[in-house]
Image (cartoon, rainbow, N blue to C red):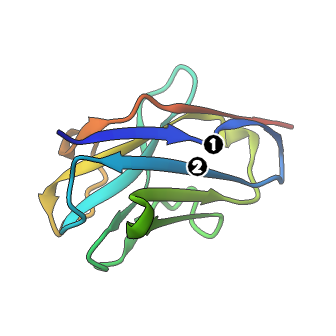
């Protein structure tokens, strides 16, 4: 049974950086994607970034490209989201999720299960 647990959220000012972590248990590090999504207040869940443990590259949303980086550390069973130059529009609950289709870096939430409980990121102006 795959379990995901996010950490690292908090309250920061515009221009600051944060690194989110997602501790993964119960799955081998194979050809399936790991992804970050976010849900801003009053809005739906949106794709942020995805990666493949087997080195098939990454997929990053245009809205965060150049500011956010997704990476993973197999030795620590952890996926990271490095967030730089944060903006108030980045305020959201950030979720880690495990992909269900091999070799595909999906952007739609329906292709991901399970999900972590989420971590709040708030960026003040």
Residue 19: where, in percent of width, then height?
A: 64, 54
Q: Is residue 32 above or below residue 111?
A: below
Residue receiving disc 1: 8
The picture quadrant where one finds residue 37 is top left
Circle 2 SS class: strand
Residue 86 lies left or right of residue 57; in this view the side is: right
Residue 117: where, in percent of width, then height?
A: 42, 28
Q: Is residue 74 above or below residue 26?
A: below
The picture quadrant where one finds residue 124 is top right
Mark 1 nearby-residue class (10 Å; few <14, some 14–19, many ≥20)? some
Q: CA distance from mark 2 to mark 1?
A: 5 Å
Residue found 38% across the figure and 35% down from its top: 116
Most foreground residue, 119 or 77: 77
First-in-chain label (2 vs 1): 1
Most foreground residue, 99 or 105: 99
Residue receiving disc 2: 20
Mark 2 nearby-residue class (10 Å; few <14, some 14–19, many ≥20)? many
């Amino acid at each position: 049974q795959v379990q995901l647990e996010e950490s690292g959220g908090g309250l920061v000012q515009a221009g600051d950086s944060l690194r989110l972590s997602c501790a993964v248990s119960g799955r081998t590090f194979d050809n399936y994607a790991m992804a970050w999504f976010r849900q801003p207040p009053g809005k739906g869940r949106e794709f942020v970034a995805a990666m493949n443990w087997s080195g098939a590259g990454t997929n990053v949303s245009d809205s965060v490209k150049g500011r956010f980086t997704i990476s993973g550390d197999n030795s620590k069973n952890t996926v990271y989201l490095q967030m730089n130059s944060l903006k108030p529009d980045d305020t959201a609950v950030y979720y880690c999720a495990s992909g269900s289709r091999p070799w595909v870096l999906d952007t739609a939430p329906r292709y991901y299960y399970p999900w972590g409980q989420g971590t709040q990121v708030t960026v003040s102006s």
